[in-house]
């Protein structure tokens, strides 16, 4: 079962569709314009039962900006959370609706940027094919 890459791809596509004008990337480069949304760390736990192979996947979405106001980044993290919470792309992946479990906005250690974190959980199942 290799659902992680598929989940990342459909999340990137969903955020690009729902939040136009803000780059959504797997890994930013020095040339990625701010604000931007990037895929952060992820992990999974086995959630299989007797007849279904499944994983509970936790993914972090990171949002960065160099704004003077954290309020602008809070708006963007709210947009990310609204785009994902309760959503599932069952055509692309056998999954249950996503549940946003945590949103946080903080100063970045670089002293210039503001960093937002949206963490979500998704139950994904192995395809029966």
Image: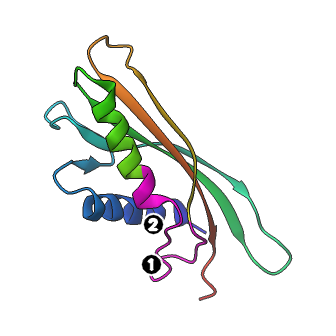
In the image, 81 versus 9, the foreground residue is 81
Would you name the residue on which mark 2 appears?
Answer: 6
At mark 2, the secondary structure is helix
Q: Is residue 89 above or below residue 57?
A: below
Q: In the image, 31: left or right of 47?
A: left
Do the residues bearing badges 2 and 1 touch, measured as CB atoms within 8 Å? Answer: yes
Q: Which secondary structure class fits the magenta region best?
A: loop
User: Is 58 placed left or right of 49 in the picture?
Assistant: left
Q: Quadrant of residue 3?
A: bottom right
Tell me where residue 28 sits by quadrant: top left
At x 21%, y 48%, the residue is: 23
The residue located at (78%, 68%) in the rendering is: 48
Tell me, yes or no, whether the highlighted magenta stretch contains residue 23: no
Position of 11 relative to 90 (above/below): above
Residue 25, percent from left and from top:
28, 48
Res 19 label:
none
Bounds of the magenta segment? 81-97
Which residue is depicted at the point 16% across and 52% down? 21
Q: Is residue 64 visible?
A: no
Q: Nearer the viewer, residue 82 or 88?
A: 82
């Amino acid at each position: 079962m290799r659902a992680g890459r598929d989940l990342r791809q459909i999340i990137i596509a969903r955020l690009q569709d729902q939040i136009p004008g803000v780059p959504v990337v797997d890994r930013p480069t020095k040339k990625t314009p701010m604000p931007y949304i990037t895929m952060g760390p992820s992990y999974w736990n086995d959630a299989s039962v007797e007849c279904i192979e499944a994983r509970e996947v936790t993914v972090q979405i990171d949002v960065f900006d160099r704004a003077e106001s954290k309020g602008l980044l809070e708006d963007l993290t709210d947009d990310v959370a609204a785009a994902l919470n309760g959503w599932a792309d069952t055509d692309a992946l056998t999954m249950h609706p996503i549940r946003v479990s945590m949103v946080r906005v903080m100063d970045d250690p670089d002293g210039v940027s503001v960093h937002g974190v949206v963490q979500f959980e998704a139950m994904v199942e192995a395809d029966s094919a």
